[in-house]
Amino acid sequence: MKNFAMLGAAGFVAPRHMRAIKDTGNALVAACDPYDGVGILDSHFPDCRFFTEVERFDRHLEKLRRRGEGADYVSICSPNYLHDAHCRLALRIGAHAICEKPLVISPWNLDPLAQIEAETGKKIYTVLQLRLHDEVRRLKATLEAQQPRQPVDIELTYVTRRGPWYHHSWKGQPEKSGTLAMNIGIHFFDMLLWLFGPVEESAVHLRTDTRMAGDLKLRFGRVRWFLSVDRDDLPPAYIARGLHAYRGLKMGDVDFDFSTGFTDLHTRVYQDILEGGGYGIEDARPSIELVHAIRNAQITPCQGPCHPLLVKDAHL
């Protein structure tokens, strides 16, 4: 059994990490969050020590390390802009880091993390869970079996409903979240690069607080992508059924709906890491570089064909 600690225990994604730690037969010995509404700990790890100050959390983990009872892993579920600092904390107290997406907001912060890995001998893992989704893995196997591969036309749509709270939180602050493309899109850009190869060209046609859209030319694909946190962009059938997220990829005449199959992906990520696999800094680099470029790109008109939701959007 391995000992885990967690930063960001009150966050949206933290319960998935708690379940993954429990499902893999391990213990959460310490958790930290400036917000103290973490009663969910009682459902998973009622004996877990809790701190609202990262300095006291750090001190406690250092005390455990000196007693030979230190954390083997630190799970990082804190706001995006704190991820690299919290990875450094994990490695400095002798633990590996398992960091939620994105590993960093700015790509130039990756190399210092790699240097700390080399200095400490510990590893920084990142959560790229779509690579473990059954449909994505089947699609990758199908694509790679087609030799020689020919570029295909792809339409990526990710709409996930978010209320006004989203824009008042750190998630709505570009300097802390990395914008919509980083906060909700990074997994999908990683998936596209993993499936269809490196970026050759990129254009951005729409960038607001609630929607982003653009085109990508990848080695084996031409992508029209659209991201949104606006409920009105959900397919009517999803709204009628009370569903709050749509994740779809259309490749030619074939549709892949990734709206389901997400419930146990964090557990799969943890199993993969604990069994000697996992994805690290270099795996995360291409999508972080792409999203950073998208965040800073000049907005250009879509020359067509355009994503259907972009055509519908009043901003075009």
Image (tube, helix red, strand yellow):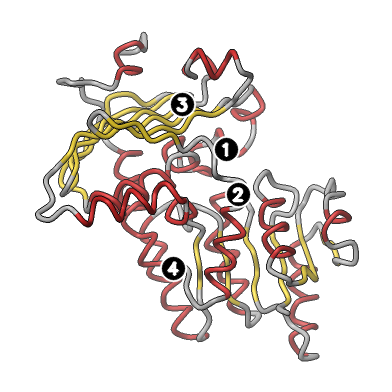
In x, y percent, where is residue 93? 66, 80
Q: Nearer the viewer, residue 312 or 292?
A: 312
> In the image, what residue type sits under mark 4?
Gly
Please rate how many residues cluster around mark 4, counting C-alpha atoms within 10 Å: few if below 14, some from 14 to 19, many from 20: some
> In the image, what residue type sits under mark 2?
Pro
Q: Nearer the viewer, residue 182 or 306?
A: 306
Q: Nearer the viewer, residue 253 or 213?
A: 253
> In the image, what residue type sits under mark 1?
Lys
Please rate how many residues cluster around mark 3, counting C-alpha atoms within 10 Å: few if below 14, some from 14 to 19, many from 20: many
Label 1 with label 2: CB-CB less than 8 Å: yes
Q: Which residue is mark 4?
A: 280
37 left or right of 162 in image = right
Callout 2 secondary element: loop
In x, y percent, where is residue 74? 65, 69
Question: Which disc is residue 47 wearing?
Answer: none
> Which of pointers 3 and 4 lies earlier in the amino acid sequence?
3
Callout 3 secondary element: strand
Q: Which residue is mark 3?
A: 228
